Image (tube, helix red, strand yellow):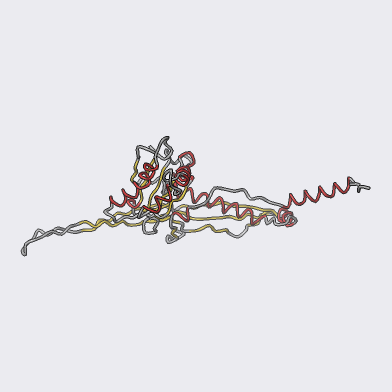
Amino acid sequence: MASEIRNDEVGIFLARELETILARSFEVEYADIKYSSLIPISTEVGSGADSYTYRVFDKQGSMKVIQDKAQDLPRADVLRKEMTYPVRSLGASFAYTVQETRAAAMVPGMNLEQRRANAVRRAYEEKVQEIAYFGDRPSGMKGFFNSDQLDTIVPDKWFTDAGITTDEMLNLLNEPATRLVNGSNMKEQPNTMLVPYEVYRIISTTPRSSTSDTTVMEFFLRTNPFINAIEPINELEADKSGGALDKDRIVTYDRSPDKLQLHIPQPLEFLPPVRESLEFTVAAHSRIGGTAIYYPKSVIVMEEG
């Protein structure tokens, strides 16, 4: 005789299934935070500073063949230029009540305070990345990708153009580094290229030729004597830049703290909770000064025509 399934047993089974589902939690996935691996970070500026200044020195002068009693000796000198940028505060907060803490303690894995603190940290990282890339116009902080200090190339063709050949793609990839190196008489030697995601997809999946398994990107990295890394960056696509860019861009540069830095005088800090009746508020605070490009000639931009 087949065993009979009673309704109360089904009810218990469904309740347990429901408990299993409710006990699981899913964190929303966000776009990558990459700024700290792309731009060297400096905490050298004091957290109490309202601005920071750096000096750029340029040597001028030449030697010439002279007579033993010559008096018209060429003059050598050093020109100094000062650049000053503001430092601004970033802030956010989260709160929790005594009852929320008690309720969260009843749910496995639910650390309410930590989750809200993580939400603040995520908001902080997103804002810092936005400022690192594009600055903040109202406060005068400078960004990396839209800096007005940089030389820009506008080629006749782009990677997404119909009928573009792999040779033309390679020419596009090689041109920025070649311009930087030749234009500086080999003083500047870039090592990193940042590209829009769509460009990255194309060069990383397109074979060098019909008889080769090597992609355009692999061939370029193997043959270019300067560039050793290509990184896909969503924000270099104009429609994902929040209005900061009019066209898709490729940025080629020397990823060195001697060339550029993102100034964060005060990394994110959480202040002690402040109690108001049955609620606790936790404030978070940071100080940031934007991206300083010490040597603009160490960076070059290629923009879609």
Q: Position of residue 273 (x, y in %)?
A: 62, 58
Question: What percent of the width, then of the height, locates residue 291?
Answer: 42, 52
Image vertical order of residue 301 relative to residue 163, above or below: below
Estimate the x, y position of residue 12 in percent, counting from the top left: 84, 49
Which residue is at the front of the view, 166 or 226?
166
Is residue 242 placed above or below 214 in the rendered structure?
Answer: above
**Residue 85: x %, y % from top left:** 39, 52
Residue 8 at least partly seen: yes
Residue 72 falls in which quadrant of the image? bottom left
Does 166 appear above or below 264? above
Left or right of 150, for residue 194: right
- Residue 141 can be seen in this image: no
Nearest the viewer among 139 and 153 is 153
Residue extending farthest top? 162
What residue is rendered at 43% in x and 40% in y? Answer: 248
Which quadrant holds the C terminus? Answer: top left
User: Residue 238's quadrant in the figure?
Assistant: top left
Residue at 91% across, 47% down: 2
